[in-house]
Image (cartoon, coloured by chain):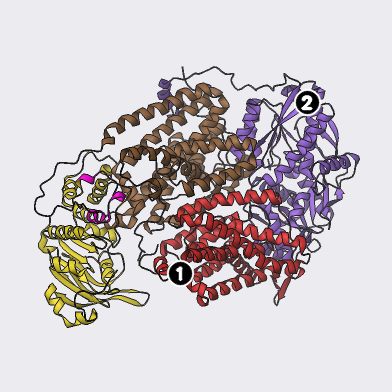
Chain colours: A red, B brown, C purple, D yellow
């Protein structure tokens, strides 16, 4: 029973990490149809931001809190730079964005190596986040996992509200649903694209801060996560956040269950097979935005 | 548009004489034959004369990559399917060949060395057994990848999973395949892969003369694949494939099942990658998961993009050029090579999507059709997945 | 005139058919020597050696430090007059964390650069990839990393620990500490799987129980499930053969789950000083490692090595076991050449047995038959300053036994 | 050619909804063989969705019979093989292929793999004929992407001709065409409808008055009126829908 709950929580927290990483992609890939392979390197940028901040802000807790908005801005700025320099020319060629941004990700990784060195760097976690909460029945829940779960939920809520309620959000949705109509309605679509990309990339930065609590901080830290995150968005369905949310948690729990019952390797393969099978059933993902000519 | 040559209106439509065949058709075949002869002279004559044994072995390796590139050129360049998991098929071909050669090295009834070391197996696993026979293993190097591609392609394309979805899925396939192989260390060699392959059908691979012959085999196979690819591209199927790339739904409304068309191209590309993998093994003496994962799979694509994805020769020249540049540059500037590789990808794909071949094609088409719009106003010739009339599946 | 040469076992195969067809294209057949080694170029007043490490890709993190310490040794030897009066010229190549590239570069170093010896490789996979190249060309490789044993190539010298110099002492230590049960965690590749087989055989013979065995795919950074299992297994200790980035994620998860060196100590065999820096002492404090060398290892030879390394590469750069083993490799080669009085590979091999050297890790001796070296095993504890201090050592150098032939419980393992 | 008598389109109770919105709401429609029917109606009336349903692009309930075959529930490409062809609002030709190649592909849905694997030795007769019919014989070897807008539309119609479609569903074929091009297109449609059934979605009322044989007016997913041009123009309900301006409706796509 303890183990069962422990595994369930592990699954949910794997899902939370997936969700944090995939949320930005749900914007840039889901809403703009850009396959940004450099998203993983934006995560890396967020993690290194935490590291750099810790050099000046000695309190682990404060530096983490400060790192959240700063990493959002840093990764977002990188995203805008990428959008302006390259992606803007490629909106009609989504597959080519994949290749171009893969090239960008290579360069960013090497840049990180040149700046910070090849070996991993360390950040300190605040004491509060290295402990755990003991629940009745001998169950313990790690604080850092709870923090990330909370952060993921907060990010989803904030993004959903922003898309629903703010003028910017309405403009983003308008552009997603009908770019031409939005343009003739006086929406500066280019600026909306840039803002969407800023937010999507910024979320990667936030994910990077969170990941410093869990894993290595090094030049290649983003590459491991990126494929899984893309699968989340693909299976979740383009154009809506709720699909990604559900799928992230579902895949997390499936992965954790598979890991427990078999091995980590086999669990990965099981997840892949499940995804292919799922796409047989719903090739457009869990939720689809129905429009007549979905580009 | 002032001078409208409208459709023939009235009943004056007896069968008009067939339009003159395209001018380039006549010279096309002769030029192709000439090209092949030149290629053969280069690969069989000049290269072995000029290059040292070591450099020739390197060239053999590059040519294997080029074979994969020919297949990607068909699937991606002509068919619009960006396959980021071609390493899987390369690996299937390579492992099939390596399994046979390992068994042959071990001798009848004996276990390959690594199985004794890491697997502690007493007998050969059942799925290794058929590979003892060359009559099974050799066809399997090509057929096994094709069967897997057929299975996956049928599932995926029939359900209209395409474009970016397909690209990501194919990439995940590569990742899954690596994990699977690495996890079964006792029977697959794990991360080490299958190494230390000594003999090739009874011939000692350490002998430089035999290494050279392996090079000739590879060169011949590449020329063969090029001939096959040329036939495919110029066939009616080749035209249909381009049509599917540029307007999958439109093709469907003409009564074709685009899924079938795509599966065929995907399967052909997989077979080519399989053959390349199979020949890579005697040339390099190793096949390992490191050759089939996400990164090598995407690196296969670089060469194709650089050379020109939609052309016949572009992918081959691009693949060889990129592989060569990698060797040459990483010897001197390892860090710089990473930057350069990234930059190459960015510049070519973003600003020259037709690859280097489009520079060449530009010269030719400008001579051939003077009324074409200048290249900077034209839609890039090779588009990815987005089709002109993409309509949601019900 | 056949294109293939050599013994023919399977005539009439497809390959032969194609080869016959190709014969028409015309080619030179026998003009080069068959299979014999390419002798090193020692004609001038210099001698070339090859440095084969990954400078790019996933393994660059570790291998760059090995390259650095090899360079240090080369410079020191040159400053002291070189080898047999010849200056060493290092020729560096990037293995790019890709095994066939290692094989390709090894071939280049041997046949194009004609080096006298090659120093490098880290992963077992890269060593397995280059092994046939060195054997074919009868050239020398010095391999400086602890590994899974079960190998003995006449053209490779192994200056890192084999299993009986690292894994087995680690287990001896746990046994001496009264640990009755262990949980095995490792990355999914050759070294951990082989190590764990040895551990299981050892446990069986020594009354220890193995409560579980889990593998994470290489590069995996998600350890929720494994730590869950480890925690609920309530083992006395964990034996950790994880590699690289996975260690960071594992220890962060481990600490968050409330486990530490007191409640359940972890013995790691792939965490050296450099890795400690990347994980953070917050997560590693007092955890155990098994190696043959630490930066803190006492002795004048080590003080000199550490000082020289830091002077050359920076005061914040730690030294570690593989770096030391690589450094030692260059000196051992020099001793062998000097004793042989020649750079000739066969003469060097013949001279190798019994050579001793006062290394930073203590006295090491080359074992002629296995071409491994006798080393002292040292168990260390991670301190708050990020350095590892020794808590136990084997007292004297342990004779290498790559196939564990002298251990009765290990029969059937190899 | 099959007997044209059997090639009428018969739609009964057709209903299409997207996520609760009913785009086509119980349409009954009969287009007899050889008709040149115009389908008009304000934006959102369900014209294109009706065509989508007939050609299998969207799922629908009810019944659509072409000749003696039920179309609903079949795959798009199977419906196409039964002789139902369509065009799209935006010209959808294969721009990287030549005009002749476009037509050749359209003509070849039933080809065997053996035929497909070989080169085209010469153009099939029907392709040659169609090139002539659509007036693009002299551009046969030009890339379709280089054609003018109107020519692309003709090429599309030509592709339906060679594919042996006996029911042609054309979605705004003259949108964006010059006056001369419209005339030529109209004449082409008249020629085509001699031995085939043609349904045209069109907003251009001038074009409609000149070429329509019969007209069906859709409104809010239902059939509002049906008959000859004169009959429909006289229908008060149609006038009401078009804001009191019976024919020159201010509609633009």
Q: Quadrant of residue D234?
A: bottom left
**C364 in the magenta segment:** no
What residue occupies the far front of the structure in this picture? Answer: B2
Q: Please give the name of the residue rendered at 38% of the width and 30% of the height, measured from the top-left corner.
A: B35
Query: Where residue D166 appears, x then y in whole percent?
Result: 17, 59
- Give how far apart the Cα atoms at labels 2 and 1 are: 71 Å
Q: Is residue C243 visible to the viewer in this orientation of the structure? A: no
**D152 in the magenta segment:** yes
Vertical side of B37 occupied by C399: above or below: below
Determine the main secondary structure of the stretch shown in magenta: helix
Q: Which residue is mark 1?
A: A187
Q: Please give the name of the residue rendered at 73% of the width and 54% of the height, measured from the top-left corner.
A: C278
- Mark 1 Cα-neighbour bin, 10 Å: few <14, some 14–19, many ≥20: some
- Disc 2 sits on a residue from what chain? C
- Mark 2 Cα-neighbour bin, 10 Å: few <14, some 14–19, many ≥20: many
Tell whether label 1 touches label 2 (CB within 8 Å).
no
Q: Which residue is mark 2?
A: C87
The span shown in magenta is D138-156
Q: Secondary structure at mark 2?
A: strand
Query: Where residue D240 appears, x then y in whole percent?
Result: 22, 82
Query: Where residue C212 appears, x then y in whole percent?
Result: 68, 58
């Amino acid at each position: 029973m303890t183990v069962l709950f422990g595994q369930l929580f592990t699954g949910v927290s794997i899902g939370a990490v997936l969700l944090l990483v995939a949320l930005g992609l749900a914007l840039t890939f889901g809403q703009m149809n850009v396959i940004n392979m450099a998203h993983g390197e934006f995560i890396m940028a967020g993690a290194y931001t935490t590291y750099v901040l810790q050099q000046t802000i000695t309190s682990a807790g404060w530096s983490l809190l400060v790192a959240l908005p700063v990493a959002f801005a840093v990764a977002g700025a990188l995203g805008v730079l990428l959008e302006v320099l390259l992606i803007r020319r490629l909106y009609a060629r989504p597959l080519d964005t994949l290749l171009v941004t893969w090239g960008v990700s290579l360069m960013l990784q090497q840049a990180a190596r040149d700046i910070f060195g090849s070996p991993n760097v360390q950040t300190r976690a605040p004491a509060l986040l290295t402990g755990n909460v003991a629940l009745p029945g001998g169950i313990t829940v790690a604080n850092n996992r709870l923090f990330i779960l909370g952060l993921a939920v907060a990010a989803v809520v904030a993004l959903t509200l922003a898309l629903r309620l703010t003028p910017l959000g309405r403009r983003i949705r308008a552009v997603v649903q009908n770019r031409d109509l939005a343009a003739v309605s006086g929406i500066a679509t280019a600026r909306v694209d840039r803002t969407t990309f800023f937010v999507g990339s910024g979320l990667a930065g936030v994910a990077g801060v969170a990941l410093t609590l869990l894993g290595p901080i090094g030049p290649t830290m983003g590459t491991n996560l990126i494929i899984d995150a893309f699968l989340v968005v693909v299976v979740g369905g383009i154009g809506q956040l709720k699909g990604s949310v559900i799928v992230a948690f579902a895949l997390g729990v499936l992965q954790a269950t598979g890991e427990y019952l078999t091995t980590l390797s086999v669990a990965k393969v099981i997840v892949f097979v499940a995804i292919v099978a799922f796409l047989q059933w719903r090739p457009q993902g869990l939720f689809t935005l129905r429009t007549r000519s979905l580009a | 548009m002032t001078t409208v040559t409208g459709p023939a209106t009235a009943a004056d439509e007896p069968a008009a004489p067939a339009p003159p065949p395209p001018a380039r058709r006549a010279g096309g075949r002769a030029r192709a034959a000439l090209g092949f002869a030149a290629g053969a002279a280069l690969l069989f004559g000049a290269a072995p004369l000029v290059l040292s044994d070591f450099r020739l072995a390197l060239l053999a390796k590059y040519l294997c990559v080029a074979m994969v590139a020919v297949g990607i050129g068909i699937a991606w360049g002509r068919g619009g399917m960006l396959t980021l998991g071609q390493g899987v098929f390369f690996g299937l071909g390579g492992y099939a060949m390596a399994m046979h050669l390992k068994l042959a090295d071990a001798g009848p009834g004996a276990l390959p060395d690594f199985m004794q070391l890491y697997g502690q197996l007493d007998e050969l696993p059942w799925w290794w057994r058929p590979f003892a026979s060359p009559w099974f293993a050799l066809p399997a190097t090509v057929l096994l990848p094709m069967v897997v591609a057929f299975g996956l392609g049928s599932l995926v394309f029939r359900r209209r999973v395409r474009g970016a979805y397909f690209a990501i899925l194919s990439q995940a396939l590569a990742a899954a395949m690596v994990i699977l192989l690495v996890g079964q260390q006792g029977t697959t060699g794990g991360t080490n892969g299958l190494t230390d392959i000594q003999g090739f059908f009874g011939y000692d691979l350490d002998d430089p003369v035999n290494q050279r012959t392996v090079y000739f085999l590879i060169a011949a196979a590449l020329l063969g694949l090029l001939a096959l690819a040329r036939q495919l591209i110029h066939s009616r199927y080749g035209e249909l494939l381009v049509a599917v790339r540029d307007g999958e739904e439109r093709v469907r409304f003409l009564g074709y099942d685009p899924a079938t068309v795509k599966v065929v191209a995907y399967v052909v590309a997989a077979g080519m990658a399989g053959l390349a993998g199979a020949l890579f093994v005697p040339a390099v003496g190793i096949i390992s998961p490191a050759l089939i994962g996400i990164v090598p799979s995407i690196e296969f694509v670089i060469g194709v993009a650089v050379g020109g994805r939609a052309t016949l020769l572009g992918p081959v020249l691009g693949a060889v050029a990129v592989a060569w540049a990698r060797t040459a540059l990483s010897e001197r500037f390892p860090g710089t090579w990473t930057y350069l590789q990234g930059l190459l990808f960015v510049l070519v794909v973003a600003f020259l999507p037709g690859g280097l071949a489009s520079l060449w094609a530009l010269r030719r088409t400008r001579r051939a059709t003077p009324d074409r719009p200048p290249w900077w106003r034209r839609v890039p010739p090779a588009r990815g997945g987005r089709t002109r009339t993409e309509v949601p599946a019900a | 005139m056949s294109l293939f040469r050599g013994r023919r076992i399977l005539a009439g195969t497809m390959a032969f058919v194609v080869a016959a067809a190709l014969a028409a294209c015309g080619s030179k057949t026998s003009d080069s020597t068959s299979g014999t080694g390419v002798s090193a170029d020692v004609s001038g007043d210099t001698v070339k050696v090859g440095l084969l490490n990954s400078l790019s890709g996933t393994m660059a993190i570790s291998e760059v430090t090995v390259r650095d310490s090899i360079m240090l040794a080369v410079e020191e030897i040159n400053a002291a007059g070189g080898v047999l009066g010849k200056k060493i010229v290092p020729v560096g190549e990037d293995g790019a964390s890709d095994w066939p590239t290692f094989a390709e570069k090894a071939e280049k170093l041997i046949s194009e650069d004609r080096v006298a010896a090659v120093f490098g490789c880290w992963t077992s996979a890269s060593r397995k990839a280059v092994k046939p190249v060195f054997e074919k060309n009868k050239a020398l490789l010095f391999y400086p990393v602890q590994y899974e044993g079960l190998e003995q190539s006449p053209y490779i010298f192994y200056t890192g620990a084999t299993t009986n110099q690292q894994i087995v002492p680690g287990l001896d230590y746990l046994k001496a500490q009264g640990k009755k049960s262990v949980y095995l965690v490792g990355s999914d590749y050759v070294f951990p799987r082989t190590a764990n087989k040895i551990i299981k055989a050892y446990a069986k013979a020594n009354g220890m129980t193995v409560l579980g065995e889990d593998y994470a795919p290489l590069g995996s950074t998600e350890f929720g499930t494994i730590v869950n299992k480890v925690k609920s297994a309530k083992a006395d200790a964990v034996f950790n053969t994880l590699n690289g980035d996975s260690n960071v994620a594992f220890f962060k998860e481990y600490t968050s789950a409330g486990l530490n060196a007191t409640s359940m100590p972890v013995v790691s065999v792939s965490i050296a000083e450099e890795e400690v820096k990347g994980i953070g002492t917050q997560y590693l404090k007092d955890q155990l490692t098994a190696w043959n060398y630490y930066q803190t290892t006492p002795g004048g030879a080590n003080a000199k090595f550490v000082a020289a390394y830091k002077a050359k590469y920076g005061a914040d750069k730690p030294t570690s076991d593989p770096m030391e083993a690589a450094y030692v490799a260059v000196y051992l080669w020099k001793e062998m050449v000097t004793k042989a009085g020649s750079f000739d590979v066969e003469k060097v091999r013949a001279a190798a047995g019994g050579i001793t050297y006062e290394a930073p890790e203590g006295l090491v001796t080359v074992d002629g038959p296995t071409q491994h070296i006798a080393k002292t095993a040292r168990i260390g504890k991670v301190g708050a300053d990020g350095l590892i201090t020794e808590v136990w050592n084997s007292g004297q150098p342990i004779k290498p036994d790559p196939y564990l032939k002298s251990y009765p419980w290990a029969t059937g393992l190899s | 050619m099959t007997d044209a008598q059997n090639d009428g389109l018969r739609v009964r109770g057709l209903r299409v909804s997207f996520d609760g919105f009913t785009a086509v709401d119980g349409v009954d429609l009969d287009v007899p063989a050889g008709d040149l029917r115009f389908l008009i109606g304000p934006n959102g009336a369900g014209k294109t969705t009706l065509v989508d349903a007939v050609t299998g692009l969207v799922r629908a309930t009810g019944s659509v019979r072409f000749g003696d075959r039920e179309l609903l529930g079949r795959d798009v490409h199977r419906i196409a093989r039964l002789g139902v062809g369509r065009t799209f609002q935006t010209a959808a030709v294969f721009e990287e292929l030549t005009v002749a190649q476009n037509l050749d592909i359209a003509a070849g849905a039933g080809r065997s793999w053996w035929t497909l694997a070989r080169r085209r030795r010469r153009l099939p007769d029907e392709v040659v004929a169609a090139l002539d019919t659509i007036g693009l014989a002299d551009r046969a070897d030009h890339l379709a992407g280089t054609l003018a807008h109107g020519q692309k539309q003709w090429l599309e119609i030509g592709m339906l001709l060679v594919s042996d479609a006996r029911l042609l569903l054309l979605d705004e074929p003259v949108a964006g065409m010059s006056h001369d091009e419209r005339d030529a297109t109209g004449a082409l449609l008249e020629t085509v409808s001699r031995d085939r059934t043609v349904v045209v979605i069109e907003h251009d009322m001038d074009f409609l008055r000149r070429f329509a044989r019969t007209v069906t007016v859709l409104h809010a997913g239902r059939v509002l009126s049906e008959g000859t041009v004169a009959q429909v123009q006289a229908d008060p309900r149609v006038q009401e829908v078009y804001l009191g301006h019976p024919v020159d409706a201010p509609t633009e796509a």
